[in-house]
Amino acid sequence: MTDLHPIPPGTRDILPDEMRELRALESALCQVFEARGYGQVATPAIEYDEVLARGDKRASSAAYRFFDERGDLLAMRTDMTIPIARVVSTRYAGAEPPLRFFYLGAAYRTVRPQRAQLREFMQAGVELIGAEAPDGTAEVIEVLCEALDAAGLGSAVIGLGDADLYRQLLTELDVDDERRARILDRLAAHDLVGLAVEVGELEPLGTGRRDTLLKLPNLRGGREILDRAKEIGGDAVERATSRLQATYDELEKRGVADRVQLDLGLLRDLGYYTGAILEVYDPALGHILGGGGRYDKLLGRYGRDLPAVGFALYLERLHLAQAEEQRIHEEEK
Amino acid sequence: MVSGVEGATRRSLDGALKLAIPRGALFEETLDALDGIGVSTKELRSDSRSLIFDAGELTIVTMRPSDVPTYVEAGAADLGITGKDVLLEQGDRDVFELLDLGFGACRMVLAARRGDDRLAEAERRFGTVRIATKYPGITERYFEETGRRAEVIEVKGSVELAPLVSLADGIVDLVATGRTLEENDLEIREEIAASTARLVSNRVSHKLRAEEVDRLAERLHEAKR
């Protein structure tokens, strides 16, 4: 019997066959990003916890943290967006926007046991700094479409929602803080039964306004859902739909709107998103391929107040989806 | 908290929507609900050994109730039916809860021996109670939320036995009628949660097969009334 030399769960060795395929995938993505004028950056895998937490407290709770020899608390990065926000405000403090960066690197998150979750996973993505909605958002979605094509994922779909919709709607409905947190929680988990219970208890609101909260999260599809959302009504809905409409118009101009599914039920769990949010789905996989969105307030927390937007793709999942799509194509031949 | 990153699971591409349904206590009523929307369940009722059934518009896969969230989260099934108790116990599963189907009503309760003071005494004298359960997640969360400490003892079989032979001071379990508790000389002390059957969906299926998923949920909702 050979001795056991284990590696921690959620990590893995990559051997030549897989590496070759990953390299090809990476270089296809890099080519797209370079061609669109994005420059590659790399940042350290470990940072000061306090600096990362400035960007997003909740992401920091999923980080691996430890003390260094001087007693400072360090954290492994949980994504690349926050480190890049830090780079922009320190290394590009005086640079004229817009700035375009892409990255290819590992990120690290704590795992729940027995769920085949990865502690270490690869992300590939872009950040466009200093470009407002809707132009900036549409540019990034266009790059994302090209990246998915380059990866051979012709049937992948991009979900586009609005992170501010429910925050603004709940303010408009004058819902108290505690209830508001619970409702946002149910929405983020897409627990429609729990949502109905919470909303049902908002008695001072009329049935109509309560229905707004229950019907909106189910609206997803093409341009027609914006009209349906407007019928459901209210100022906050009106504002969110016109933001989505403006982005969608821009996407149509760029010829990529047909890959985008508008989705008023979309809420991502990272706290820094404002306005447009994205998720990427492929029919071959049960989990999302990646996501992103606008984070217009994040850079301000690092001292350079610029609007920004970006996305990240999970490379391991991309690879798996790619293999599935290839298999299907071969079967069809 | 930011969600973890699973190693992705492969799934079937198109064809009929795949619905995971629970064998066991919810099985009959689940089949009745499917009959109610015109899905044929004849084969399901007569064949207790097969696992996968072709029901025309749906492919139906049968499994233990507690496995349903696992299959649905991974996308191995597009939709599933299971009890809220299962969803509460596996609270970190990333599935969308679409509909309360209304049947299979039961309650998650804290129970102890009738007329016995041990639960309160343990709390007073030792600062912690020993609770036997098949639902360690729900139990831990409930005691934490109510500001108490519990030593949770996970058992797989008849949990009513545990307080009778002093393995535990009390139990957390699911009751429908309460008869099993009564027969074992146990009584309900606290109610933790109410449970009914729920329709859940994989998050990618919910987006990419939106119309079919919505239509099925809609029909099940209509048939309920």
Image (cartoon, coloured by chain):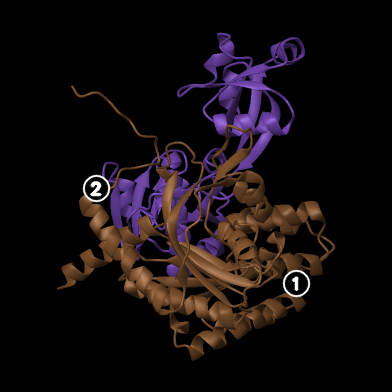
Q: Type of residue at label 1? A: Gly
Q: Type of residue at label 2? A: Leu
Judge by depth and name the residue closer to the eye, A267 or A220: A267
Are dots 2 and 1 in contact, CB under 8 Å?
no
Residue A191 in which image quadrant: bottom right
Q: Residue shown at 31%/58% (left/top)?
A: A320
Q: Is residue B56 visible?
A: no
Mark toward the start of the polypeptide (2 vs 1): 2
* Residue B211 higher or lower than B76, as above or below: below
Q: Residue shown at 50%/69% (left/top)?
A: A101
How many numbered marks are there? Answer: 2
Residue A15 — which label? 2
Residue A234 relative to residue A326: left or right = right
Residue A179 in which image quadrant: bottom right
Q: Name the subunit of mark 2.
A: A
Q: Which chain is brown?
A: A
Q: Residue shown at 59%/61% (left/top)?
A: A87
Residue B26 relative to residue A86: left or right = left
Identify residue for label 1: A208
User: In the displayed image of the protein, which residue is found farthest to the left?
Assistant: A333
